[in-house]
Amino acid sequence: MADAEDKTTHFGFRDVPEAEKAGMVHGVFSSVASKYDVMNDLMSAGIHRIWKDAMMDWLAPRPGQRLLDVAGGTGDVAFRFLARAPDARAVVCDMTENMLVEGRKRAEAASLADRLDWVVGDAMALPFESNSFDSYTISFGIRNVTRIPDALREAYRVLRPGGRLMVLEFSQIPNDLMQKAYDLYSFNVIPAMGQMVTGDRESYQYLVESIRKFPEQERFAAMIREAGFEQVKYRNLSMGIAALHSGWKI
């Protein structure tokens, strides 16, 4: 049996040692942190905002709840949650401190700083007690995790009984011709756009490749069930370019 340090995983289309991936992902997001929100708008023509609103519609935040938003970066999802749930609180957890710094600036500008906490942490080993959150969200982040099953088990651990997991992630279009057209756009336009806006083509090349390596909808739903969640369902967004996955800790 191979030693743990010999195990490999994917970083985009490259195979890399598991022990190195987190640092490489950290480098990607540290590089693009200051322009991350601008690039999200440009890459998706603003549609990511509609997807995140759809996430909140399905999650239906309630007053007084406590949210953990993992890989929450600059707080986009946490802000939406707090806007819909009076007296609720949110914790944004991300491995990249530069992203959290940008988020804190936004929170202060929106007068939400007193309802938000910002924590540097790893999705595979969350620095929180078990059974301590009502909702766990992760948006466009789980595909960057080195061991996705570990992250899903951690999500299950920190949720209270009756708590809900919701994942928003890029996915696969169930139409080969449309998928090929989307791939042409992704591989030819997005890295070039990243170079123009952030001066970093390689990071956006990785992000495009990481989407293609992420499990398709049914397979990922099965992984959520294997982590212990029940009533697992998903909804395709924009014909499957992205998908929302939901599961409950019963």
Image (tube, helix red, strand yellow):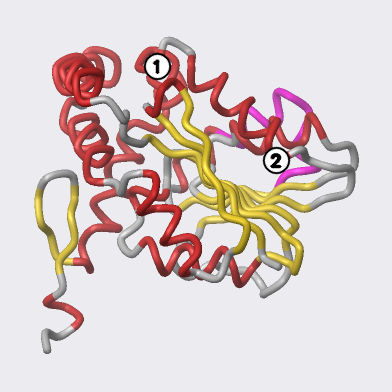
Under mark 1, the amino acid is Ser
Image: magenta residue range: 103-116
- Indicate the secondary structure of the residue bearing disc 1: helix
Q: Residues within 10 Å of mark 2 (few under 14, many from 20)?
A: some
**Disc sitting over residue 93 in the figure:** none
Cα distance between the residues tagged 2 and 1: 22 Å
Q: Residue at x 30, y 49 (%)?
A: 215
Q: Tell whether position 96 is magenta.
A: no
Q: Residue furthest front?
A: 175
What is the x, y in percent for residue 194? 25, 20
Residue wearing tag 1: 44
Residue wearing tag 2: 59
Q: Quadrant of residue 173?
A: top left
Check the picture and name the quadrant holding the N terminus.
bottom left
Q: Residue at x 44, y 20 (%)?
A: 238
What is the x, y in percent for residue 181? 20, 16
Q: Residues within 10 Å of mark 1 (few under 14, many from 20)?
A: few
Q: Mark 2 touching mark 1, by CB under 8 A?
A: no
Q: Residue at x 89, y 37 (%)?
A: 86
Q: Tell whether position 106 is magenta.
A: yes
- Relative to 230, say whether 110 is above or below: above
- Indicate the secondary structure of the residue bearing disc 2: helix
- Relative to 24, say whether 72 is above or below: above
Q: What secondary structure is the magenta-colored segment mainly?
A: helix
Q: Earlier in the sequence, mark 2 or mark 1?
A: 1
Under mark 2, the amino acid is Leu
- Relative to 16, say whether 86 is above or below: above
Q: Residue at x 41, y 27 (%)?
A: 36
Camera-near label (2 vs 1) is 2
